Image (cartoon, rainbow, N blue to C red):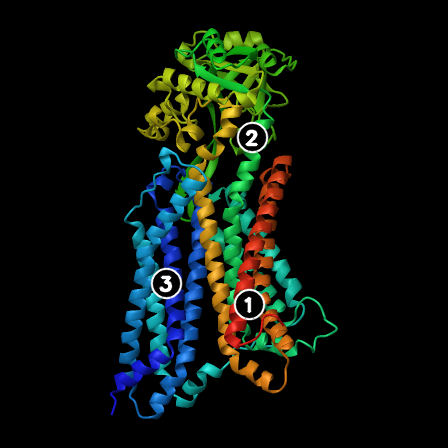
Amino acid sequence: MKQFSEVYSHLRRANKKQYALLAGCCFFSVLLITAYVCMMRSPTILNVLPEGGDSRKQVMMIFVLAVIGCGAFTTYAAGLFFRQKSRETGIFLALGAKRGQLKKELMRELALLALVSCGAGALLGGPLAWGLWQIFRVLVVDTEQMSLTFDPKAYGLAAAFSGFVIAVLFFLGSRSIRKTNIMDIVQEARKSEPIRDVPRWCGPVGIGLLAAGGFLGYIMPSVFILVLHWYPPEGLTAVFYLPALAGLYMILLHTVVNGWHRSRHRYRDLIATSMMKFQGRQTVNNMLVMSVLIAGAYFAGFYTPMLGTGAMMSCDSRPVDYAYHYRADQNLPSEQEVRAMAQEYGVTITSWTEIPMARLAVDGYERVETQGPVGITWEEEYREILCSDLFLSESSYNALTGEQLDLLPGRICGIMDATGDGRGIFGGEATLVTNYLTGESYPVTPVETRKHDILFGRFVVDDADYARMTAGLPDSWRETMVFFDVADCEESYDFAKALFNRIVDASGPEVAVVDSWDPVIRDRDMAEKGSYWPEVESFSYDQRNSSYFRLYWQYMPQFRVLDKADFVRTLAVFLILFIFIAIICFAAVIVIAFTRCMTIALTNRQVYEDMRKLGAPNAYLYSSIRGQVSRVFLVPALTGTGLIYGFYAMIMYFNDNRLTLQELAGMGVCLALVAAVSALLYGVYRLTLRSVCRALKISASR
């Protein structure tokens, strides 16, 4: 007479595939989330991503999508496991076993399975992140700032997700034991989750909700801040994306139940279509998770081609090969020294322009924030001395650009970037200019702005006005701008690198400041708050090749050949981080799709056996299973890709109410990325189809 535990153990061995599937799902979910968390919270990453910046927000947003996707996937896998296990539970109860006995055995094996699978995923998540990072260092770029370190606190988030997975397993396991009707328990595994009839208008309405939700979710933060003068609580604006999620669900429902076209041979695929409908809820839920993850993966994946294409085209469109500026109190190399250095490296300088600039204070409106009962609100307050900007005389501007700008006395011209939108940080207008050290103020009238990427953020005034406004300024408030061209820019990298190092070596600690450092704002903040935030962000000239230094140093030179050649090196952490995120999300999609397709094979095995016995040829069986597997892959891929591509195009357009040539080129490169990833997913689809056919004993050769 065998003990109850022995019988239970025997059944566990007989159903080892179900246990392996559940353990594998838990393992992969925890593994991917742990790897993501380790990377996201790594000091290597946090030192580069600015606090409160868009990059951090994107990383967090995609992380939330990944957690939701992996959490839903694990919950689905656990539910499927207990449905398959319900038959033996019911039989045990029918034979007189007590629920306490079953619960004890089930909890014991769940505890072992959860601890092993989640523990292994958590332990291997860090090594996975580290291993992928090292591969990137070998294949992409390797710099001193690429040394990856982990924050032990990151494992707290991984542990929290593991706790969620374990809690789901125990909750669903306890619920499966508590069911009272033995026959319901026995038949649980055979129950389907069909979708009731879905009206055909569900698809078009879903598309409308998807578009409306995407638009509202993107535009509402601007409405709150710019129109209502209110900073909404963190996460509130995400509510406006919910119509998009509902619309996506309706689109997937319509696709599974109705399809998007009426086929002449709709009865030919009646059985395959019916099987999809009978498992409709499971299918739609999986498709929804996959679509969201694919959208998140592409959102991260598009970062690199968009940034790279824009940067390369921006470098190529610069009107000058070499440009740099420095404070007049710094002992930087003179024109003769630079020419001598160029000659040493075999570089011919074909033109040289050097002009003076000065730092003056300008007026403007400042946002004054107030903490109220509904959160933080703001109002604009005019300040006669708001901040400082660099000023050029009109003759200096003409010498640098070759234009013929002729300003009347009392007029001021702002210089925008090449697109003319000011990048959201510069309006190009001022009505009062003040010599901050002497206190002399000069009313001015703005005229039409000019466009120049290198001179962006500066003002131009009449020559006589410039001399009068800058009188009495010391060298620490004066600067020099240098433009020069070379005969063969593409072959001058060594010279550019040497000149960059020479400039950094000659710069003193007083100019080791971020690009947002402003002496006028500093004085005001020190008087009103007792501290000035940018001074916390100091630079070390020893880290001159780091992303942070090259992106944010106020006096960073702009050398075309250096910026192009070192683009990947400069932005390596950004690029590799988002590539890593995309890989994690696509890996989750592949695991979910494969698991779902194998579930189709396990669930419908008897149906295919019956059709085979009724005389269905292999070609028909293959066509049927191919239709189901292809839909699992194709529908989320098309939906997720179309969703994020349209959303990305909307973001690019609403940045400045147009699509620039650089943005269009970047979107074209993104299409190439979509094609490459689609080819990869097609390869996975073919492998999955073979595995499903093998499990159902269907020949893949038709």
Q: Which mark is residue 296?
A: none
At label 2, the amino acid type is Gly
Q: CA distance from mark 1 to mark 3?
A: 23 Å
Residue closest to the eye, 656 or 630: 630
Q: Residue furthest right?
A: 264
Up-down relation of residue 287 to residue 12 (above or below) = above
Query: Quadrant of the image for the C terminus?
Result: bottom right
Mark 1 or mark 3, earlier in chain: 3
Q: Which mark is residue 422?
A: 2
**Does dot 1 land on a helix, a strand or a loop?**
helix
- Graded by Cα atoms within 10 Å as few (under 14), some (14 to 19) or many (20 or more), the crowding at tag 2 reads some
Frontmost of labels 2 and 1 is: 1
Q: Residue at x 44, y 32 (%)?
A: 570
- Residue 503 position in % (x across, y down): 41, 17
Determine whether, in the image, residue 379 is placed left or right of residue 485. left
- Residue 148 position in % (x across, y down): 34, 42
**Does dot 3 land on a helix, a strand or a loop?**
helix
Q: Are marks 2 and 1 in contact (CB under 8 Å)?
A: no
Mark 2 or mark 1, earlier in chain: 2
- Residue 276 position in % (x across, y down): 58, 74
Residue 657 shows up from this direction: no
Q: CA distance from mark 3 to mark 2?
A: 48 Å
At label 3, the amino acid type is Phe
Frontmost of labels 1 and 3 is: 1
Residue that badge 3 annotates: 27
- Residue 272 position in % (x across, y down): 61, 76
Q: Residue at x 35, y 19 (%)?
A: 510
Query: Where, by quadrant of the figure, is residue 487 drawn?
Result: top right
Q: Residue at x 53, y 78 (%)?
A: 604
Residue that badge 1 annotates: 689
